[in-house]
Amino acid sequence: MDYLLTLSIIFIQPVLWLGIIKVLLNNKKRLSRERNSFNTAIYQNNFELKHFLLGFLLFGIFGSILSILVGTFISVPWIILYEVLLLLNIVLIPYRLFPIIIAGITTLITMIPSIFDYINDSFDSSIDLSMTANQNILFLISLIILMSGLFWRYFVGRYNTPEISKNKRGNRVAGYLLNEMTVFPLLVLIPGDQLQKAISFWPTFMVGHQSFSLFLLPVLLSAKMKIFKNVPLKIAKKIGNSIVKLGILGFILTIGSYFFPIVTLYSIGILIIVYLLILIRIKLQDLKSEKWFSDAVEGVSVIGVRPSTPADKMGVEIGDRIVEVNNKTVHNKNEFYEAILSSPTFCRLKLINRNDRIKITESAIYNDSPNELGVVLFK
């Protein structure tokens, strides 16, 4: 393998850097949208980058431990194709990322002997296709699916920016775009000594008559969906739980594939299809739900809650409808703020949640900022 190309794959990691650039652009776009819609940024902090870096660290450590314990080894052709397809996805279709599908497409392409041989020859490799057993790819895809589920479950849906539009009836409604991503380094083994030929100090291990090198594979995780009728955090957890179960099923199928190798490729296809069906099913469930996040006729609808504010501490949630403030009935936003100003240092709210249950909550508020209760309302 060419020396400079080897160094670029190992150290430059274009997927990682393009991922960081995309996250920074997502943050800039979100802040601009919030300021245009609400005259201020709802979430000042760059939570997109924070989640990206946390995912990089936590998933990188956890995933690499699992990978090395299992002894996952991936061929150079598979890695090259996977990274090239990820780069093309990020550059050409930046608004929609398909990391799980790309892993499946990579597997299918490398199974075509002529293409595999071409890449093999191009990178001065002498790896037999059988050296990268399909069980390794099945385990890798199962691991990526598991990490994707954990990403949905524990990272997505914590910060929700409302986007105002009108439904078919002409009513103003709020939608929430879940849009986060991360790239984490996964430690895998590469059959052969290509890396050591280019970098003499690169560690190589011998297993029987075959040598293996360590390699950090950049794995992309993406979570994107627009929600109109359900609480975003609940949807994200629901998606995450379903995908985690699918990843665990993938591990079970991996074990079974060692006893019945013929099921390996079918299992890869089934995992990818079920993964897509999970996302489609939950999206359709949201569209078929009846309750929109709509502007209230009586009271004011909460479509966002700023973190670390009195409203956040009082447990006000997206979808709550405020009907009474400081014992004064409110019908619109003007009456809402007038009622808050009637007691600048204390606030008592009567709310009706999305289940039509009454909640009463109260809290002290900042003496110098009575308007900063922390709720986001229709403008």
Image (tube, grey):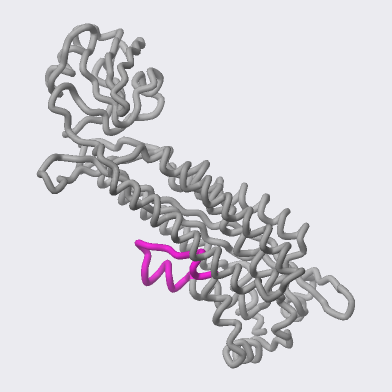
Q: Residue at x 31, y 44 (%)?
A: 176
Magenta region:
86-103
User: Looking at the picture, how far across and down is residue 295, in whole percent?
Assistant: 17, 33
User: x, y (%) of residue 328?
Assistant: 18, 9
Q: Which of the image's four quarters has the N terminus?
A: bottom right
Q: Answer whether residue 278 is visible to the viewer in this image.
A: yes
Q: Quadrant of residue 279?
A: bottom left
Residue 139 in magenta stretch:
no
Magenta-colored segment: predominant secondary structure: helix
For the residue pair 210 and 104, the one nearer the viewer reads as: 104
- Asked if residue 340 lies left or right of residue 170, the reply is right
**The quarter of the displayed image where residue 319 is located:** top left
State left or right for residue 208 relative to residue 79: right
Tell me residue 9's x, y (percent). Answer: 60, 72
Residue 274 vertical position relative to residue 373 in the rendered view, above or below: below
Q: Position of residue 130 (x, y in %)?
A: 73, 82
Residue drawn at (76%, 81%) of the image: 197
The verdict on residue 90 being magenta is yes
The image shows a total of numbered marks equal to 0
